[in-house]
Image (tube, helix red, strand yellow):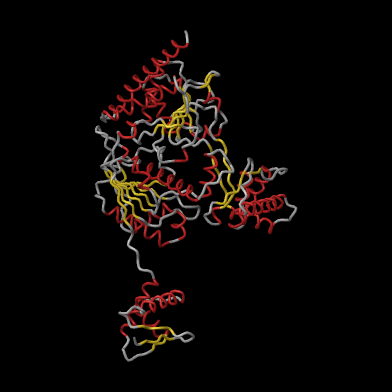
Amino acid sequence: MDRHRFDAHRILLAEAVTDAGLDIVLSAIQGFGNGVSAEHRLALRDLQAGFSSQAFINPGRIAYALPCGGGKTLSVIAWITASHRLAPDVSVAVSVAQIAALCDIKRQLIENGVPEELIGLRHSHGLKAGFRDTGASDRPIMLLSHSRLRRGSESELFTQHKGMARTLLFWDETLIPFEAESLSWLDVRFACKRVLEELNPSDPLALAAAQASATFTAEFDRQRTGLPPSTAILFQGHDREALAHKARHRAASGTEAGRAAYRSLEALFRLSQSPVSLAITGNGASGDGVIRYTVAVDPDLANIAVLDASYPVRTLAHTGQVKEGTTPAMRSFKTYDRVAVRELKLATGRTTLISNPESMKSMVAAVAHVIRAVPDSESILIFSFKGDNKKTLQTNLLRSLEKEGVDLRAEVNGRARISSLTWGNECSLNEYSHCKHVILAGVLRRHPLDLAASLTGKYDDLAYRAGTGELKAVEHAEAAHCVLQAMNRGACRTIDDTGRAGAMTLTIVANVSGLHETLAPVLPGIDWSVELPERKPSRTWQVENAILNVLADTSPTVEKITCRLLKARAQAIVGGHISSDVWTNALRKALLLTLAPSMQRWEKIKGAAQVVRHVR
C-alpha cells in the first residue's frame, strides 16, 4: 500500500470511528433520560473527531476543555468501544484519579461488548474496588490511577502494548507533567538550630544541619545582592537515606517542637535526592525556601488526550508540551443563565480560621444565614478545609452550625439535605448533582513558595523566578480552578436538552480576588454578585467619637479637662477597657477634628495630662 493510500485509509478509519463513537455516546446520554441539544451534539462529535485524529493522523498531547457534566467519560468509553469494533489493533490506556471511576469505566466497556479479558486494571484496593487487579498482564486496554502512572514503576505496561507504543492515552482532569515540592526556610532554619543545640557536633545529623544552614544562608545573601539563583544537590558525600531514617526516628518522640524540627529535616533530606534551589518570593520570610521539581509523566507518553474543564483558567497546565484542542462548540454549548453566584467577602483562609476564632464565628454566621434561606425541600453541599492535626476545621464548622440551629440530620428524598466535602475532593465526584445549593466555606489557596516551585516545573528551569505579579496571577488561577470544580459537583454540572446548566446557587464565603473575571468567560450567562461585609467600626473610631461627644457636652465655662477624666467619660460611652495605644490614637484624631471651623477647638498641652479649650 503506497503512502497516499495508507493516509487515505487512516482518514477513512478515523471518520468511521468518530461516527460510531458519536452514536454510542449519544445513545448512552439518552439512555440516562437526557436530551442533547444540537450544539452539544456538535461538541461531542468534535471530541470524538479529536480522539480519532490523535489516534490515526496527528498525535500529540492535546487538552479538550469540555465543561463538567458534558459527557467526557462517556465519550472516552464510546471511543474505545468504537475502536474495538472497527480498529482492533488500537491499544489505549486510561488514567483517572480514583479507582472507583476506573472500575465504572471497565463495567461500562464490558456492557458495551468489549471482552473483559482485553481490559487490564491495576490497583491495590482488593475486592472492595469491584474488579480484581489484573496484575502485570499486557492488555490492549489498560486502566490505572494517576498516582500509579506518576510513580513510573510500570511505565512500559502503559506506554506500550506488545512492544509497540500505545495508540492513545486518555488523561482525566488537568495534566501537570511535573511534581513540584517546597520547604519553608523558616522551618529549615528552626530545624537546623534545634539540631545543632541538641546533638553532638560530630553527629551526622548535626553535620548535615550545619552544612545546610551555611549553604542556605550564603545562597540567600547571594540572591539579595542581585545575583541569579544557583542550583545544587545537597549533602553530597552523605547517605541521605540514612540521614532521613535517623531524622524520622527522632521525630517519633520528644516535644512537639522537636518532632516538627526533625520532620522538617527528613523532608529536606528527601528533597535533596535531586537538585534543589532557593527561592525568595517577596511574600515575607515564610515565602522563602527550598524548591524543586521532578518529571512525573513519562516523556514517552507523547500521545495523550487530556479532558480538563479547568484548562482555560489553570495557567499552570499551559506548558509547551500540551496544546489546546477545544473547539468553539465545546466552549459555548453549555450556558449558566440559571446559576447565581454570590461572593461574600470575608477573611476565611485556612490559617486565618485556625488562628482567629472571630473569623470562624463570622464564617459560621454567614453560612448559617445562607442555609436558613434555602427551602427545606432543597439539598445543600458545603466545601470546607480539613484543618490540621489538632484542629479539624470541617468538624468545627459542622458542630458550630448545629449550635446555630442547623439540622444536619435532615433528609430530602431519602438523602442527606446537607452534605459536606473537604478541599481535595472537588474533582470528578458526581453523586451530589442533586444539590441545588453549593457553599464554599473558604477557598483553597496555594502557598506562594509552592507556586514558585510549580512555575520552575512549568518552564522546566529550576532557576526560573516568577515576579510578584505572576505569582499572584497563578494563585488566582489556581483558586478559580478550585471554585470551578467545586461548583460543578452540584446541580449546575447537569445539562438539559437546550444546553442549559441545572439551576443552582453558589455562595463563596471568601475574600479571593479575580474569581469573577477569571471564571466568567468559561461560564457564559452566569449571574454573579459581590457582597462586602458590614464592617464594625474600629475601637479607635468608637473612642474618637466618644471623645468628641464628651468635649461637645462640656460646659462652655470649662476651659480645661484632665485626660484621666476625659478617658473615664469616653470609656463610659463605649464600654470596656480602652488600651493605651487606642487612647493615644483616638485622642490625636479627635483633637485634629476640632480644628474644623465649625468645632470648638481643643488642644493637648505638651507635658501635661490635660486638654485645653481655645476661644476662636
Residue 132 percent across, percent down from the top left: 47, 27
Q: Nearer the viewer, residue 474 or 31?
A: 474
Q: Nearer the viewer, residue 115 or 22?
A: 22
Residue 65 percent across, percent down from the top left: 38, 34
Residue drawn at 30 percent across, 43 percent down: 435
Looking at the image, residue 193 sits to the left or right of residue 423; the answer is: right
Residue drawn at 52 percent across, 27 percent down: 301
Q: Nearer the viewer, residue 190 or 314?
A: 314
The answer, for residue 481, to whether it is visible in the render is yes
Q: Quadrant of the C terminus?
A: bottom left
Looking at the image, residue 536 sits to the left or right of residue 275; the answer is: left
Residue 19 percent across, percent down from the top left: 34, 19
| Residue at the extreme bottom | 557
Residue drawn at 69 percent across, 45 percent down: 235
Residue 76 percent across, percent down from the top left: 39, 27
Q: Is residue 48 above or below residue 582?
A: above
Looking at the image, residue 615 sits to the left or right of residue 257; the answer is: left
Q: Is residue 127 above or below residue 577?
A: above
| Residue at the extreme right | 202
The answer, for residue 251, to whether it is visible in the render is no
